[in-house]
Image: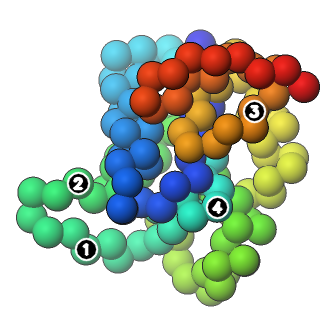
Amino acid sequence: MNILLIINDAPYGSEKAYNALRLALTLTKEHESASVRIFLMADAVTCALTGQKTPDGFYNIERMLKGLCSKGVMVKACGTCVDARGLRQLALIDGVDRGRQGSDVLSALSSVVSLQCGVTDVRKCCVLTVNCQLSTANW
């Protein structure tokens, strides 16, 4: 099974990125044959920044992404979104690549399943959002 998670919310403030990464971690643990990919766009590109400091006992998106990368999950951050936020010169987490929205998303959408977190315009795929609303959209 091929799974793509597209995340576009900031790492903290809402729990959409957190829930998407929890789902990715669960999928990699419980379905070892699954190919999980993550595309960070819009404010979610800040999920890939290094040096995140959170209070003890609070989830840490950087640690979650590092764990996923260590398990072989492909993680890309939209290059245009990185540039738009002035983050080009900042270090991204090891294993997170700077991607291109057009070609990377199109190649990733060849996935059988697309789990989309926080985005409402998805085409030709089944969409399961983090808040468990199931819908389909067509191009």
Residue at disc 2, secondary structure: loop
Where is mark 1, residue-wise? Answer: 53
Earlier-in-chain disc, 1 versus 4: 4
For the point 45% across and 22% down, the residue is 132
For the point 50% across and 14% down, the residue is 33
Q: Quadrant of the N terminus?
A: top right
Residue 19 is drawn in which quadrant? top left
Please provide percent x and percent y for residue 26: 34, 26
Query: Which residue, as the protein is rendered here, is positioned at the far left?
Result: 56
Q: CA distance from mark 2 to mark 4?
A: 21 Å
Q: Inspect the image, locate mark 4, and give the three-letter code of the amino acid beneath it.
A: Ala
For the point 17% across and 58% down, the residue is 58
Q: CA distance from mark 3 to mark 4?
A: 15 Å
Mark 1 or 3, closer to the camera = 3
Mark 1 or 4, closer to the camera = 4
Where is mark 4, residue-wise? Answer: 42
Earlier-in-chain disc, 3 versus 4: 4
